[in-house]
Image: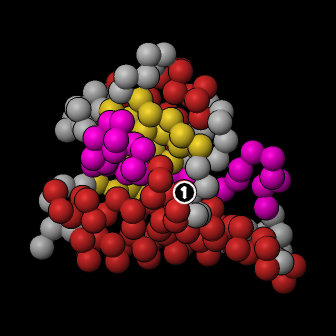
Amino acid sequence: MTGVKDRVALVTGAGSPEGIGFATARLLYSAGAKIAITSTTDRINERRDEIERTALNVFSGAADLTDSTAVNTLIEQIESDLGPIEIVINNAGLAQIGRDKPSTLFHEVSDEQWHYGIDINLTSAFMVTRAVLPGMMERNYGRIINISSVTGPSVGIAGSSVYSAAKAGMLGMTRSLAIESGPK
């Protein structure tokens, strides 16, 4: 991996030791990036310690990424500790600790299940991207990678209508974002 040395990278959804987010954070760190990792619980501090015990180039913080105030506070803390965020990996989603993985047929989906699924799988990426994008545009540099799924844009699975809708929405948001803010 090249081009990330000394750049500040935020990886959301990095709380699981076996997950995509934590693996991505470790890879970026090994390539020389300064890493900010986040999840919904304080277990994120365990992941920080697994990357670097001294935590000089690693920031960890628990935050509700569906809350704009919490996201803005998190971004301010990261940029105060590590510098301007230049890379974002929007990986948060699917499930959270203490909640069952949703699998409900479309006609049985409650309002709460719908909002929860859309919030953790799509709204979180929107909130983080919206918070970092102005700085990236001002500096004329930024990389945003949104982790989606084949479920939704390409494949349908019974009981996954909310997840599918969110991940298809992620793809649409990513395409529009690239057109709006990418190189002209």
Q: Secondary structure at mark 1?
A: helix
Quadrant holding the C terminus? bottom left
Q: Is residue 73 left or right of residue 82?
A: right
Q: Is residue 13 left or right of residue 96?
A: left
Q: Is residue 130 visible?
A: yes
Q: Is residue 91 magenta?
A: yes
Q: Residues within 10 Å of mark 1 (few under 14, many from 20)?
A: some
Q: Residue furthest right?
A: 108
Query: Residue at image x 58%, y 64%?
Result: 67
Q: Is residue 38 left or right of residue 32?
A: right
- From this view, report whether residue 62 is shown above or below residue 169: above
- Magenta part of the protein: which range? 75-102
Q: Nearer the viewer, residue 111 or 167?
A: 111
Q: Say what amino acid the circle numbered 1 marks.
A: Ala
Which residue was labeled with disc 1? 70
- From this view, report whether residue 47 is shown above or below residue 100: above
